Amino acid sequence: MNDMQKKFFEHLAVIQKSCVENCMAKHGTSDKDTENLMYDVTYDVITKMLEMIDGYSDYSNDRHDIVNTATGEGLKNDPFIELHDMTENFLK
């Protein structure tokens, strides 16, 4: 995994945590079961979105990539990765 790929997934983990914490605060709950449920849902949503980019969805069988517009680098390359395969290493 290259540095750009690692930073991308680390940031997805920060987004997931922030969204769960914000929602729990908004609804005034600290229940661990609710927290676990929210992590499960956000994990599934993020993974399904990455499956769509990777070409494994009803949306399209076409493969897509996320490209750094400044460098032209594709997120999925060097080394090649399937984005949805990486979520379990970073997300809760």
Image (cartoon, rainbow, N blue to C red):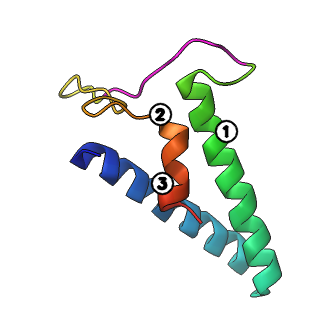
Q: Are marks 3 and 2 in contact (CB under 8 Å)?
A: no
Indicate left or right for 69 with 48 as reference. Answer: left
Residue 40 in picture, x, y percent from top left: 73, 62
Instruction: Check the image and report above or below for 59 versus 43.
Output: above
Indicate left or right for 55 with 78 as reference. Answer: right
Instruction: Check the image and report above or below for 4 versus 57.
Output: below
Q: Which residue is mark 1?
A: 48
Provide the secondary structure element on which disc 3 rests.
Answer: helix
Q: Which quadrant of the view contains residue 33?
A: bottom right
Residue at the spot x=40%, y=28% of the render?
66
Q: Residue furthest left?
A: 71
Provide the secondary structure element on which disc 2 rests.
Answer: loop
Q: Which residue is mark 2?
A: 82
Q: Badge 2 local density, few (<14 within 10 Å), some, or many (20+)?
A: some
Q: Are marks 1 and 2 in contact (CB under 8 Å)?
A: no
Provide the secondary structure element on which disc 1 rests.
Answer: helix
Q: Which residue is mark 3?
A: 12
Q: Amino acid type of disc 1?
A: Lys
